[in-house]
Amino acid sequence: MPSQNRRKPHQEGLLKNKVEEQKEENKEVSALIHLLDDHDVEVYGHVVSKLMACGPGIIPQLESAWSDSFDPELHERIEDLIHRIQFESLFDAFKKYVDENEFDLFTGACLIARFAYPEFKGELLTKDIANLRKDIWLELNYSLTPLEQVNIFNQVFFGNLGFKIDHVQHLVESDFYINKLIESRKGHPILLGLLYIILSRKLDFPLYGLNLPNHFALVFCREEIDFTEDPDDLRNEVIFYINPQNQGSIFTKNQIHEYLTKMDVVPAAKHYAPCSDKKIIQLLLTQLMNYFISKNDDTRTKELNRLIALIDGK
């Protein structure tokens, strides 16, 4: 009796054709890569366009070509091309994320981490997030008041787990990426607040961001927020405010008013109402872009501006 696993003739033919097609594609890519050192601007531009259209799948061949060459100029061109291909892949993923219009904070933070770590997979952090949530949950008592519960959360998050902000004057690029935050336990204030919100919601706390001038804080609300409501109505849902930049200390509307007065800002409803998750992702991207502006890195600045523009367009 013939083996059921044996391929039929037409299946073998299709497989053979596919292998041959792949070989031809690899030959074409190899030929294009060999033209990357061409000094003719038009030829070089055409080659780059063709290679970029191939997508991330050609990166191993590019890396191999880099290793086989001792030409510094070719190295630089290959590195630039790899970066451009990886960024376009991120851009496509981020556009899909924005188009879905859900703005899940964890997914957004993981996509931002891919800006520096293109091979990073967000799934790798799910176990870490679950463990952090468990560490806090074990200490919680849901019969306590929201304020008492937040105090316990703060004790574990800032005390036991050691999370803290990296002050603006000491910022490094890794402070903006969630994978490095979980690894080093320090990061940008917005990213730290973002992680605080992610963990709080996994513990059923209705927590949101608060976008103050030059300061990102948190809001503990009575229930989940509908951001189609007017800011005047939203601020009525606030129970209290949390300052993640000061070990999760609690503050009031009066203290926000005092802060705005010192900043010479006219108080408005938006300063007291929670902001959307979409706004938090936008703020984190903007701060990362500002970091690269301070480093005079025009390439990264323009790339981040393209990602921000996707959100602005929604």
Image (tube, rainbow, N blue to C red):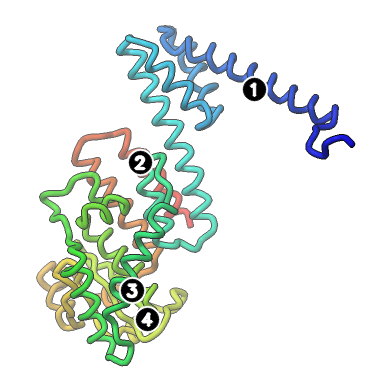
Measure how far apart labels 4 and 2 are at the Cα level: 37 Å
Residue at x-position 53% and y-position 14%: 30
Q: Nearer the viewer, residue 93 or 163?
A: 163
Callout 2 amino acid: Tyr
Measure how far apart labels 3 and 2 are at the Cα level: 26 Å
Measure how far apart labels 1 and 3 are at the Cα level: 49 Å
Task: Name the N-terminal-most of marks 3 and 2.
Answer: 2
Measure how far apart labels 4 and 3 are at the Cα level: 19 Å
Q: Nearer the viewer, mark 4 or mark 1?
A: 1
Callout 3 amino acid: Ser
Using the rendered view, name the quadrant where residue 254 is placed: bottom left
Residue corresponding to mark 1: 22
Callout 4 amino acid: Leu
Residues at marks 4 and 3 touching, judged by CB atoms closer than 8 Å: no
Mark 1 surroundings within 10 Å by alpha-carbon count, few (fewer than 14), some (14 through 19), many (20 or more)? few
Residue corresponding to mark 4: 234
Residue corresponding to mark 3: 200
Residues at marks 1 and 2 touching, judged by CB atoms closer than 8 Å: no
Residue at x-position 45% and y-position 61%: 103
The answer to whether residue 282 is above or below residue 203 is above
Residue corresponding to mark 2: 117
Task: Name the N-terminal-most of marks 4 and 1.
Answer: 1
The answer to whether residue 303 is above or below residue 82 is below
